[in-house]
Image (spheres, rainbow, N blue to C red):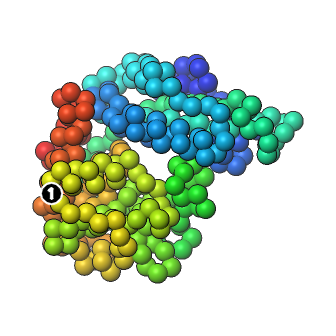
Amino acid sequence: MIVFLNGKYLDAREARVGLFDGGYLYGDGVFETIRLYAGRPFDLDGHLGRLADNLAALDFAWRPDRAAVTEIVAELVRRNGLSGRDARCRLTVSRGGSPDDPLPLAGLGSLPPTVSAWMEPLGPHLAAWQRDGVAVAVLREGFRRGNSPGIKSLNYLPTVLALREARRRGCAEALICDERDRLLEGATSNVFVVAAGRLATPPLSRGLLGGRTRALVIEAAARLGLPCDETDVTVADAAGADEVFLCGSVKEIVPVTAVDGVPVGGGAPGPVTRRLQEAYRRGVRDSLGGGAGGPAGAPA
């Protein structure tokens, strides 16, 4: 794998980040994961806009330049032989540092950041998830994001722990809820429930990350004439819903077939989820000028 690190393209085994980098020491940094279709990035402006907002919130002086990022992505695609393939690209910006000031609290804008990017092809499991759906586990307190849930920061330990626990329970994803059993989000996704043809998704005010795909799904639902409410959704609501689905930039829209072992609807992907999958992929094709219909084997 060839990666980008601070202006250079390197073999991944040769890439090194400094011991006093703020991302390594404190999770002081942010990232974006960008989906590539046939080697082309989708929703790049949306991701870079959120990245810029997050950097501003953390007092970084560095901002992503669209032309430069586009060039980096294209070069990584070329060097890694991913032209024409679906992939994911991770762009990370972390706080620089030095042994002279291992915990910088002032003058943050003067610290040169660590900027990196790498990409990998999508695995075959994703098409199966989208086609057949997945089971999810509900996790409660202790797995929520930190005090800045709207920032896609490098402090990702709660997410990693949630995913490990979900896998121990034989599930593909974890749904995180609060002390009142209100759903917040998936560990690496946002969640929607469907009841009587109406969508509902937890509001951002509850403390969750507003995913780029979440916003695009809400827009797609509006185009299809499907009502969508940003409102509280409980675990019981999800278990008793007609349909439940997850969404994220890499996974697109993935049906949920069981919540804590309880089948959702008939235990199979539902018609509203299928309509939204189709609408989402149509939006991708329109945005990229055709030829990007989602992973091979996924339903059209």
Q: What is the x, y in percent for residue 158?
A: 56, 61
The count of marks equals 1
Whether residue 209 is situated above or below residue 52 in the rendered picture: below
Q: Which type of secondary structure does the marked residue at label 1 adopt?
A: loop
Quarter holding residue 123: top left
On the question of residue 148 being in view, the answer is yes
Give the residue drawn at x 60%, y 41%.
Answer: 56
Q: What is the x, y in percent for residue 70?
A: 42, 23
Q: Nearer the viewer, residue 54 or 115?
A: 54
Whether residue 249 is situated above or below residue 74 in the rendered picture: below
Give the residue drawn at x 62%, y 31%.
Answer: 62
Q: Viewed as shown, does residue 223 lie left or right of 53?
A: left
Q: Nearer the viewer, residue 233 or 9?
A: 233
Which quadrant: the C terminus?
top left
Q: Viewed as shown, does residue 113 lie left or right of 207?
A: right
Whether residue 272 is situated above or below residue 69 in the rendered picture: below
Q: Which residue is mark 1?
A: 225
Give the residue drawn at x 58%, y 19%.
Answer: 8
Whether residue 8 is situated above or below residue 19 in the rendered picture: above
On the question of residue 129 being in view, the answer is no
Q: Viewed as shown, does residue 235 lie left or right of 144?
A: left
> Which amino acid type is shown beneath numbered disc 1?
Gly
Q: What is the x, y in percent for residue 184?
A: 43, 67
Q: What is the x, y in percent for residue 60?
A: 65, 38
Quarter holding residue 249: top left
Q: Residues within 10 Å of mark 1 (few under 14, many from 20)?
A: few
Q: Nearer the viewer, residue 202 or 295?
A: 202
Give the residue drawn at x 57%, y 31%.
Answer: 63
